């Protein structure tokens, strides 16, 4: 299912880019090559990355796309493509959700909305960072994986703010 949904997002992205061809030609710009990846996690539905050397990447969150695939394709794909196109047409000198982006969203046939409204309760538990139990003289602490790994590697020690004792794993 992931491969099919990702292929669908790639095709929808390509369709949006094709829809903008006349607008690009009108302004003397050539069509862009945009890489599409379905590897985004967390609460963001999509993301555009501009890499050195000029290549552009759109990343989509399949966990969110699976919740409402039709709505995701209709809203998120044009949203991210509009970011790519406004950046390309205006040389990155525009506000991310400013009037140029809004006009591009309308050109792509989508309502300009800054944020998605997908219900993320199903994905919240999938990407919540694990917490590690530690203790001091006065209580139990839950540390992030980053802090836990720093302690494990001997790079850092953390102290309780209340009693001042070094935290130890339970």
Image: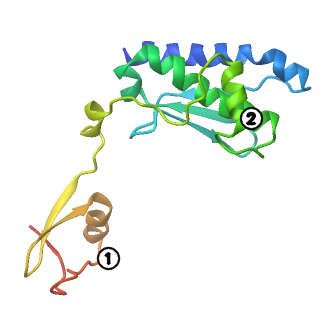
Q: Which residue is mark 1?
A: 156
Indicate the quadrant containing the C terminus: top left, top right, bottom left or bottom right: bottom left
Query: Where residue 70 is drawn, which disc sits there?
Result: none
* Residue under the point 60% across and 19% down: 110
Distance Cα–Cα, label 2 vs label 1: 47 Å
Q: Which sits earlier in the primary sequence, circle 2 or circle 1?
A: 2
* Residue under the point 51% across and 15% down: 7
* Residue under the point 48% across and 28% down: 38
Residue 129, position in %: x, y? 28, 50
Residue 12, position in %: x, y? 58, 15
Q: How many callouts does the rendering have?
A: 2
Evaluate if marks 2 and 1 touch, with contact meaning CB atoms under 8 Å apart: no
Q: Which residue is mark 2?
A: 100
Residue 73, position in %: x, y? 51, 17
Q: Is residue 12 left or right of residue 131?
A: right
Local SS, label 2: helix
Q: Is residue 166 left or right of residue 21?
A: left
Camera-side residue: 29 or 117? 117
Q: Residues within 10 Å of mark 2 (few under 14, many from 20)?
A: some
Instruction: Give residue 90's quadrant in the image.
Output: top right
Camera-side residue: 75 or 15? 75
Q: Is residue 14 above or below residue 114?
A: above
Q: Residues within 10 Å of mark 1 (few under 14, many from 20)?
A: few
């Amino acid at each position: 299912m992931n491969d099919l949904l990702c292929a669908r997002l790639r095709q929808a992205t390509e369709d949006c880019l094709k829809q903008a061809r006349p607008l690009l030609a009108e302004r003397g710009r050539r069509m862009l090559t945009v890489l599409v990846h379905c590897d985004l996690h967390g609460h963001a539905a999509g993301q555009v990355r501009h890499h050195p050397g000029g290549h552009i990447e759109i990343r989509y969150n399949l966990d969110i796309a699976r919740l409402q695939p039709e709505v995701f394709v209709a809203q998120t794909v044009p949203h991210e493509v509009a970011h790519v196109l406004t950046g390309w047409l205006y040389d990155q000198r525009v506000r991310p959700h400013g009037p140029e982006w809004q006009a591009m969203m309308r050109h792509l046939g989508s309502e300009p909305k800054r944020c998605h409204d997908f219900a993320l309760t199903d994905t919240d538990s999938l990407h919540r960072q694990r917490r590690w139990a530690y203790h001091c003289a006065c209580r139990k602490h839950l540390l992030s994986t980053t802090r836990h790994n720093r302690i494990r590697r001997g790079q850092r020690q953390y102290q309780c703010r209340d009693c001042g004792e070094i935290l130890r794993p339970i």
